[in-house]
Amino acid sequence: MKRFFLGCLALVMLTGTGVASAQSIEKAIKYRQGAFSVMGWHFGAIVDMIKGKRPFDREDFARRAKIISDVSFIPLEGFVANSFEGSTKSKVEIWANFSDFEAKLKQMQEAATHLSTASLSDDYDATKRAAIKLGKTCKSCHDEYRNK
Ligand code: ASC
């Protein structure tokens, strides 16, 4: 029991400062970029299928859409306090408007989930519309919160 309390105390002392080290900020930046990179990889393939640059394969499309929707829930945790300094394009505005940023991320997650569901149907037009909608949610956040 005593060890448990000492352990808790140590944990509180370690995390209690609320100041993240430059190293842990870089780690968080890499973490979220990894997730966005996975989403971008698969969305790129999806867009190519829609544009006819790659053969449309419904099963492969749905597999990729599922990955995007699953991974869409990953990045938020990586936007730790003040992680706009370092190897990132994230704008400081994210932290000044965090609830708006979160709302935009949520719209992306919803659009991704919708695309994943639509891609399991035989309704190609609805699937295409869902993909375009997802792309718009990416863009709207990038326009506001990502440096060029
Ligand atoms: C991607 C990617 C983006 C978005 C955006 C959609 O695949 O890397 O930044 O889609 O182009 O508008």
Image (spheres, rainbow, N blue to C red):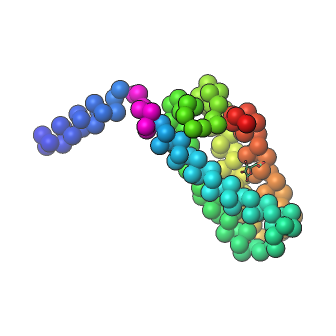
**Residue depicted at 52% across the width and 47% down the height:** 31
What span is in magenta? 18-24
The correct choice, above or below, for 23 with respect to 95 in the image is: below
Q: In terms of image quadrants, where is residue 97? A: top right
**Residue depicted at 68% across the width and 59% down the height:** 41
Q: In terms of image quadrants, where is residue 139? A: top right
Q: Nearer the viewer, residue 70 or 29?
A: 29
Count of picture labels: 0
The correct choice, above or below, for 5 with respect to 74 in the image is: above
Residue 128: image location, x then y, percent? 83, 61
**Image quarter hosting the C terminus:** top right
Q: Nearer the viewer, residue 134 or 118?
A: 134
Residue 127: image location, x then y, percent? 80, 63
**Image quarter hosting the N terminus:** top left
**Residue depicted at 70% across the width and 34% down the height:** 147
Q: Is residue 113 visible?
A: no
Check residue 137 for magenta coloring. Answer: no
The correct choice, above or below, for 83 with respect to 130 in the image is: above
Answer with left or right where residue 95 lies relative to residue 56: left
Q: In terms of image quadrants, where is residue 123? A: bottom right
Residue 24: image location, x then y, percent? 43, 38
**Residue closest to the far front:** 87
Check residue 23 for magenta coloring. Answer: yes
Q: Is residue 67 visible?
A: yes
Answer with left or right where residue 11 lies relative to residue 77: left
Answer with left or right where residue 55 lies relative to residue 17: right
The correct choice, above or below, for 41 with respect to 20 in the image is: below
**Residue depicted at 69% across the width and 36% down the height:** 146
